[in-house]
Amino acid sequence: MHMHSKNVETKLFRRGLSLVGVALGVLCLLSGYAQAVPASNTATATASAIVFQPITVAVADSTTLNFGKFAPTGVAGTVSIDAMNGSRSSSNVFLFTGSPSGRLKLQVVGEPDEGFVLSITTSPVTLTCDSGPCTGGSTPMPVTLFKAFPGTGGGSSPIGDIPTTHTLDGFGVLGVGLGGTLNVAADQTPGTYSGTFNVSVAYQ
Amino acid sequence: MKKLLLSTAAIAVMGLSAGVAYAVPTLNSVTATADATVAAPVLIEQTVGLNFGTFAIYNDAVNNASITTDGSGDNKVQVLGGQLDAEFDVIGEGNASYTLALTDTGVAGSDKVTLTNAGNTMTADLATTGGLVRNLTAGADSITVVGTISGLSGGQASGLYQGTYTATVTYP
């Protein structure tokens, strides 16, 4: 709009100059006429950017997702760790209640009050034999992961394939609990099993 | 013109009073022309500011993250939107050629702009689609300037960065 009005002014200016030019030509008997014009023009241009803090995720308190010690039965069963509080439950397996178990705790740090998506980039997540009688041949145990955000209320939910947005607090921090369900085969071969998976976070 | 008319009238009165009838000489005239070609001034105006939008640099980036105003970034940057190439309108003499110069108002020099945030800086390279020697087809031209910031690290301070540069257009 501003440019448009400038353009009109410029045309009017030129027309005015032309009339004056003719008048001068008549009066001064073709004495000649020249008008200097700006041959250069400058605009001040702007540049801007907003840089967010890097968003990071780290394991907190040296925790692991630990399903503890249990005994299989003749039927397939499960061992579950609650993402919210780390409590353990089971079906069709016998839990050794004295053995340590618990959820994985993560801490996400980034830009205050910004949304982010947490995802597991390992698929599927399985536990395979580390040591013991299972060495040399055993059935891997698949894990279904659940997430929870104890600081913000609400329950645990499957991590799932469709990411859900979460929001960092006013200090740019959010604690995440990861639990899961371990699928145990009938007469699962005894031994120590382990696995790894990757957790990633990104701003939404 | 009024004076000319008055003197013609005076001659007519004098002729009548002398009692002699003779033709009043027709006022001879010639159409005089004066020519001057005034080129339209060349004018430039920013219509869209260069905007790198919002982005986050990955923590493990070490002088190797980059972002451009066309919305692309490398694998060390998460691009979060708002990126805009700069746009300028230029008007002037039809079909005239002109040159464009982009100069940082800070220290970075030609075809660059320095963005600052409380002592933290980022330097962007400026590229013009269509080059710096241009033509005013039909008396107007549109310029697109793309900015690229490269060599960023994860430790770059977060916040709003701003800077200015000048765009100068000149007839050759």
Image: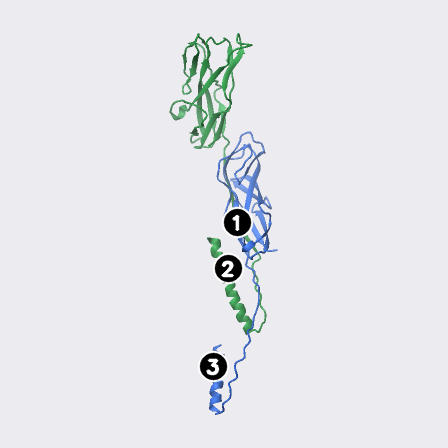
| Three-letter amino acid code at the position of disc 1 | Phe
Say if mark 2 contacts mark 3, CB within 8 Å: no
Identify the hue of chain B.
blue
SS category of the residue bearing label 3:
helix
**Residue A96 at least partly seen:** no
SS category of the residue bearing label 1:
strand
Marks 3 and 1 sit apart, C-alpha to C-alpha, by 57 Å
Q: Same chain for the residues at labels 2 and 3, yes or no?
A: no
Task: Name the residue that disc number 2 marks.
Answer: A10
SS category of the residue bearing label 2:
helix
- Return the x and y of residue B167 as percentages of the image width and height: 56, 49
Image-based side of A185 in relation to B62, left or right: left
Marks 2 and 1 sit apart, C-alpha to C-alpha, by 19 Å
- Return the x and y of residue B151 as percentages of the image width and height: 58, 36
| Three-letter amino acid code at the position of disc 2 | Thr
Identify the hue of chain A.
green
Q: Residue B88 carries which label?
A: 1
Q: Same chain for the residues at labels 2 and 1, yes or no?
A: no
Residue projecting furthest to the left: A154
Earlier in the chain: of badge 3 and badge 1, it is 3
Q: Is residue B138 above or below residue B32?
A: above
- Return the x and y of residue A5 as percentages of the image width and height: 47, 56
**Residue B142 at least partly seen:** yes
| Three-letter amino acid code at the position of disc 3 | Leu
- Return the x and y of residue B164 as percentages of the image width and height: 53, 46
Task: Name the residue that disc number 3 marks.
Answer: B6
In the rendered structure, the residue with mark 1 lies on which chain?
B
